[in-house]
Structure formats: C-alpha cells, structure tokens
Image: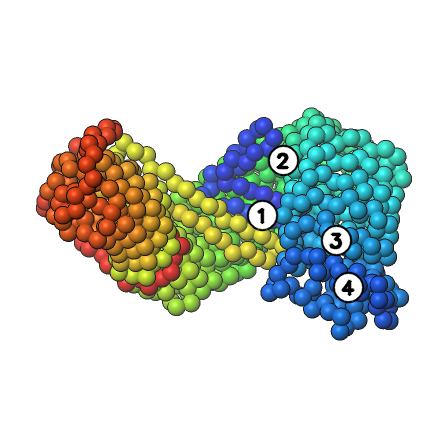
C-alpha cells in the first residue's frame, strides 16, 4: 500500500499595512511602515492507494503516452513526464500508481503543464483512476473539462493552484465516490453548486481563494453528511451564513473568512460542532456575539485554532476561559478595550496570539506565563508603561504602534535568543540600544524606528549582518557615524538610518551588502554614484524632499514585507521592499542639490517624476543606456544649471518646454543619442554650441550645420512654472561624496 500526504492550508492570519477591502467596506489594518505578515498552518490529510507490482497493461501505457504527447510542458522543469517512455513499465513511471497493471493514481504536480485539458480525451479513458493530482500547473485560464464524470472511480481530485477559470462543471457533482475535492487558488467564479454537498462520501471540500460569489444556499440532509473539512475562505460570497453549516456535526475545520458574509452571528451555534478544531470567520461583515452563560461553557467544543479577526467584538467573551486546548487565537482588528485579562495570559498551550488593532491599554498579568508562546502580535493598541518580559521561546514579537515608554529591559532582550522578528516601531522607548541585542543572532527583522533612542549605533550589530535582512532605526536621536563594519557575508536587504543625528560619510564597506535593495539614510542633497556598475531602471522619485519645491509634499511608495510562518513557525519567505531611495551623505549649509548617475549601465526611460525635483541644480544621467523620450516634465526644474543626458539611446524630439522653462541653464549636453527634429531656437538654447547636440543624426537647425526642411517653427508651449524664491548662492559649502560601490541593484 502506498500513501501520499496532502498538505492543506489550514489557517492564515493576514496583517496588511494598507487599506484592506472587505466587501464594500474598508478596514484600516496598519500604519506600520512596510509590514505585511502572513501566518499560516498546515494540516496533513493522508490518502492511501493500493499499489501492486506487475506489468502495466498495454492499453494503459498507450493512454498515458497519448496524454503526454498532447500536453504542453517544459522539459527543463519536468521531473516526471519528461521521463515517460516506452522502454519502461508505465507502473514504474514517476507520478503513476497501479493496481494489477491498471493506472489508479496520477500525480503530476508542479510539472509546468500549460494550456488546457480539452484535448486530453486519453486522460478520461483511464477508467480505473482513483486519485488525480494536477496542482501547481498553469492551465492558462481554461475551464475544468466536463468529461470528469467519465472517471467514475475517482475519490481524490486536486486541481489547486492550476490556473482554472469559469464555473465548476456539473460533472464534478456526479463523482459519487469522491472523498476529497481541492480546487483552491484558481479563478473559478459563479455560485458554489449546492449539489457538491450531496456527494455521499465527500469529506474534504477546499474552494478557497477563488472568485465565487452570491449566497451560499442551505445544505439539505446535513445529518447524513461526512464532511469534516470545509474551506470557502477568500471568495466573494455574501448574505448570511446558512445555519445548516453549523449542523455538519463531523466538521473539524471550518473556514469562511475573507468573504462578504453579513448579519449577526451568535457563537452559541458552534456548540453543536463537538468535533470542531479550527474555526475562522474573520474578515467578513459579521457582528459576532455570544450570549451564553457560565454553565454552557462545558458544552463548547475544545477548539485549537480560533480566528475571529474583524468581527466587531468589543470584549473578551468568557467562553474563552474554558478553551484549554487553544493553541492559536486571533482577535485582531476588533474593538476590544481595557485590559488583556489575566486568565487569557494563563493559557499555557497557546503558541500564537494576535490581539493587534484593538484598544487595549494594560496587561493584567505577565506575558512570561505563556510558556509555549512563539508568535505574539500586540501591535496598534494603546499599551503603555514598561515593556513586558517575554515568553522564553518567542520567535515573532510585534509591539509596534503602542505607548510603551521605558528603556528596553535586559530580560526582554534575553528572551529574543530564538526570535527572527522584533519590532518596537512607533513607541516612546528611550535610552541607548543595548549591546545585548546582538545576542539575538537569529533576527532577520529588527525595527526600532520612531522612538527616542539615543547614543551611538552599536558596533556589534555588524555581527548580525550575516542573518539580518531588515534594520530600521529611523527617526530616533542616534548620534555618531555609521560603523564601517559591513562584512562580505552581509545579507541586508533594507537599511534605514534616516531622521537621526548621524554625521559623516557613507562607509565604503557598505559595498559588501550586495543584496541591498533599500537604503534610507536621510534628507538627500547630493547623490553621486557615477562611474560604477549599477544596472536596472532609474528609480522613481519619492521622498527626496531636499530636492523638491517647498510646496510639493513628497510621497512614498512601498511594497510590503511578506512573511510566512509554517506549522513549525519557521521564517520561510524572503522579502522584497522598496523604501524612499534616499541618502543623507552630508549636512550642507547652503542648499545645493545634485544628482549624478552617469557612467553606469542604467536603462529604461527617464521617469516623469524627475520633474518634481524643483530645487535641483545639477542633473547628470550621461553614459548609460536610457531609452524613450526626454520627459517634458524636466521643464519644471527651473533652477537647473547643468543638464547632461549625453551618450544614451534617447529618441524623439527635444521638448520645446525645456527651452522655455530652463532659463538658468548654463550647461547642456544632449549629444550622441537618437534625437530627431528641429533644435528649439528660444532663450538659453540659442547660446549652446554644436557640441551640445552632436551625434544625433536626426537633429537639424542652429547650431548644427544640418538645415531643417522648411516649416514654420512651432510657438513655445505654455505651461505653469513655479520659480523658487531662493537666490542662487555662489558660496557653496558642501562636500562631494564618492561611493566606490560595485553592486548590481534593481533600481
């Protein structure tokens, strides 16, 4: 007998630092910069099929080879199909299970299959097939074929993560032996066929993360149902939750989260589900209440995972007192006020606790009593006073956006020896950053931003750079310089020291952080990264306040961190984030702003956003591989004195707006591009020499020798200009900072 293990996403907690859409409502989930956390578990569902040795029957091998020949898949990525051939018994092929020479199981997960299943008539002729797994392929929006009813012996069907579109065909409802149906993570739509609930042997129904809509109808004959797993989460279902769902007495797992279910729901209804282990009703439009008495606590099922986020709860319901087997509790994004009760802080089996985004003020007991706790999120509350001691084995701690006002206790730091995530962002924590933080050698994210820390950046942090991915010390009162201790095995992706009192030069050893994607060291006045090996596209300009006009409010753009914590609570996913591309290189007495990106390998168009840098004096993008047209928005750089775009692949005409707007321009070089048309003959452009325009075969007119075909010169376009009131200062007091970086960055 051969057994396979099916990993089913059991539950997940989503904390999104942006507006999250729940139906027509908008719920503000986070103002913590740059955090997006996913917390997910898995449960193993085991299915077994009998495998017998013996030669594959000829018709079975022919059907499999015919199916292979009609499939589109990548030979480079395939680990099964690519090895199917006539020289070996088909019962010995990877992904094939047989009984008495007949194919009863096919597992073609992750085979890079694309296209559709419409032409696979041979698949539907495998009449003995009991188990079919086509998950993690890409069927390019094709519909699930209606021929599935030909596979009358099928008891396990997994088409998850496979790119299917359209509605569930009625043929699926004819598979009367079906025990497991998994269609999650597709683009299936329409209503959920109520006929699926009539399948007599169905135990697992997984339809999450699709686009199903409409109301869920009442289920008939629920007393005879064998269903133990029902997951309809992350769809567009609406209306009230049918009460018959809470009569499926064999249910172990019920997840209806992230839909548009509405109305009031009394939690007393789950008392009928004596086998329930996992319940997730979060992120709907439900008002979840409980009106039971103390005597009814004992009749509640002993739930292991309870997720009631965003359910308009205003207090900790007393039935939780009796949940002795609770391992994960999520009551985030509710309206709970006051204390975190002492009885909740005595749940010794709790592994994960999320109470973020409530109105909690105090802890009515020590957190250290939660001896099994690994993941703790109390962010975005009103907790105050001293930072609490932590449980001994905690791996994820988020205290951000509270009112803690103490120093960091040594005991708190000592509890981080196993932690990979620690955030105190947006509190009032003061004192120096303790050196003992460097003992937390597993930390991947350390966020102490927006506090009152003073003193110097601990030198010992350099010992953490081999594991640390994110270090955020923004907006504190740190002094001194950045330690020049970035070693060759630096793993940093994000580094933010901005809005402190740090002085000095950017350390050259930062070049060792070759994975760095986001660098923010403060208010930008000079950027000189010329003559390096930077590649990628020019960055869009957000948050470069020193280069922008005082009337323009800088904006910021972030892609958020993503974390996945599996059943073992292990940090799995790498992170990609983009903060403001800013560097505080040196404090300059008189404003002088320079961008020099010359002599690199930058490509793509010049972003329109460069036109927002209205205090810019010098812009040098020469000797790159830039393409596209010169954006007319550069005419807004009314203080610009030097513009060098030479030695690129720029095309199109020279915008007339540049000649009309750049009245302070004293140096211009547009040479050796692919520009065409007449050179503007107004204002400053009449003062530049032939060298400014050389090497553009399509340009004509003065100062070049090439005459233009006769045509009436266009009038200068009109556009709004806002000149800065600041005078040009000749007595500049600044320091040029050169970065000897040899990195490959995706700018």
| Label number found at residue 409 | none
Q: Please state the horizontal and vertical placement of residue 480, each as a whole percent of the image.
A: 28, 55
Q: CA distance from mark 1 to mark 2?
A: 14 Å
Q: Secondary structure at mark 2?
A: loop
Q: Please state the horizontal and vertical placement of residue 402, each as a whole percent of the image.
A: 48, 40
Confirm whether residue 107 shows in the render: no
Q: Say whether disc 2 or disc 4 marks the residue closer to the N-terminus.
A: 4
Q: CA distance from mark 1 to mark 4?
A: 35 Å
**Residues marked 2 and 4 touching at CB (< 8 Å):** no
**Residues marked 1 and 3 touching at CB (< 8 Å):** no
Q: Say whether disc 3 or disc 2 marks the residue closer to the N-terminus.
A: 3
Residue to which mark 3 is pinned = 120
For mark 2, does the 10 Å Cα neighbourhood hold few (<14), some (14 to 19), or many (20 or more) residues? many
Q: CA distance from mark 3 to mark 2?
A: 40 Å
Report the quarter where the N terminus lies: bottom right
Residue to which mark 2 is pinned = 283
Can you tell which of label 3 and label 2 is closer to the viewer? 3
| Label number found at residue 96 | 4
Q: Say whether disc 3 or disc 4 marks the residue closer to the N-terminus.
A: 4
Residue to which mark 1 is pinned = 38
- Say whether residue 282 is left or right of residue 510: right
């Amino acid at each position: 007998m051969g057994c396979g293990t099916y990993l089913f996403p059991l539950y997940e907690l989503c904390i999104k630092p942006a507006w999250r859409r729940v139906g027509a409502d908008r719920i503000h989930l986070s103002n913590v910069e740059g955090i997006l956390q996913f917390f997910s578990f898995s449960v193993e569902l085991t299915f077994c099929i009998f495998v017998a040795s013996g030669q594959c029957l000829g018709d079975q091998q022919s059907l499999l080879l015919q199916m292979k020949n009609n499939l589109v898949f990548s030979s480079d990525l395939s680990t099964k199909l690519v090895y199917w051939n006539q020289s070996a018994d088909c019962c010995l092929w990877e992904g094939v299970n047989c009984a008495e020479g007949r194919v009863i199981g096919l597992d073609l997960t992750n085979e890079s299959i694309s296209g559709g299943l419409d032409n696979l008539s041979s698949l539907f002729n495998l009449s003995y097939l009991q188990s079919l797994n086509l998950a993690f392929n890409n069927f390019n929006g094709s519909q699930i074929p209606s021929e599935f009813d030909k596979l009358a012996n099928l008891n396990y069907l997994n088409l998850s993560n496979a790119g299917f579109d359209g509605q569930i065909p009625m043929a699926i409802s004819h598979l009367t032996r079906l025990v497991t149906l998994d269609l999650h993570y597709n683009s299936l739509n329409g209503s959920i066929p109520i006929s699926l609930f009539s399948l007599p042997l169905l135990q697992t129904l997984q339809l999450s993360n699709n686009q199903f809509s409409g109301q869920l109808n009442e289920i008939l004959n629920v007393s005879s149902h064998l269903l133990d797993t029902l997951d309809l989460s992350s769809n567009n279902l609406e209306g009230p939750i049918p009460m018959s769902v809470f009569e499926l007495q064999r249910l172990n797992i019920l997840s209806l989260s992230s839909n548009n279910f509405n109305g009031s729901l009394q939690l007393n209804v789950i008392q009928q589900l004596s086998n329930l282990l996992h319940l997730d009703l979060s992120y709907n439009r439900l008002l979840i209440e409980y009106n039971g008495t103390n005597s009814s606590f004992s009749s509640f099922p002993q739930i292991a995972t309870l997720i009631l986020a965003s359910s308009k709860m205003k207090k900790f319901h007393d039935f939780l007192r009796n949940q002795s087997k609770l391992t994960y509790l999520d009551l985030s994004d509710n309206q709970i006020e006051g204390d975190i009760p002492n009885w909740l802080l005595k749940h010794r089996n709790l592994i994960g606790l999320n109470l973020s985004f409530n109105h909690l003020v105090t802890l009515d007991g020590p957190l250290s009593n939660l001896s099994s706790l690994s993941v703790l999120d109390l962010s975005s509350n009103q907790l105050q006073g001293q930072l609490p001691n932590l449980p001994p084995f905690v791996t994820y701690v988020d205290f951000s956006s509270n009112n803690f006002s103490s120093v960091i206790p040594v005991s708190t730091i000592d509890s981080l020896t196993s932690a990979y995530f620690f955030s105190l962002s947006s509190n009032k924590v003061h004192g120096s950053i303790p050196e003992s933080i460097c003992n937390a050698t597993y930390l991947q994210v350390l966020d102490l931003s927006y506090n009152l820390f003073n003193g110097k950046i601990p030198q010992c942090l350099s010992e953490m750079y081999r594991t640390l991915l994110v270090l955020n010390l923004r907006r504190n009162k740190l002094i001194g310089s950045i330690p020049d201790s970035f070693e060759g095995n630096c793993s940093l992706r994000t580094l933010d020291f901005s809005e402190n009192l740090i002085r000095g030069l950017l350390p050259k050893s930062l070049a060792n952080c070759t994975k760095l994607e986001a660098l923010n060291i403060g208010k930008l006045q000079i950027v000189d990264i010329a003559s390096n090996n930077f590649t990628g596209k020019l960055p869009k300009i957000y948050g470069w306040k020193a280069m922008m006009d005082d009337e323009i409010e800088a904006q910021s753009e972030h892609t958020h961190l993503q974390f996945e914590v599996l059943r073992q609570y292990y940090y799995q996913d790498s992170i990609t984030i983009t903060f403001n591309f800013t560097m505080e290189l040196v404090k300059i007495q008189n404003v002088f702003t320079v961008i020099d990106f010359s002599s690199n390998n930058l490509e793509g168009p010049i972003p329109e956003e460069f036109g927002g840098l209205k205090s810019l004096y010098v812009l040098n993008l020469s000797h790159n591989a830039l393409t596209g047209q010169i954006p007319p928005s550069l005419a807004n750089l009314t203080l610009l004195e030097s513009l060098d775009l030479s030695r690129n692949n720029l095309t199109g005409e020279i915008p007339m707006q540049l000649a009309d707007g750049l009245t302070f321009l004293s140096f211009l070089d547009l040479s050796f591009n692919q520009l065409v048309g007449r050179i503007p003959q107004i204002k400053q452009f009449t003062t530049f020499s032939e060298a400014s325009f050389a090497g553009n075969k399509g340009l004509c007119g003065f100062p070049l020798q090439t005459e233009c075909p006769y045509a009436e010169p266009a009038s200068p376009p009109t556009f709004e200009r806002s000149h800065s009131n600041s005078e040009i200062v000749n007595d500049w007091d600044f320091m040029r900072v050169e970065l000897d970086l040899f990195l490959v960055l995706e700018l």
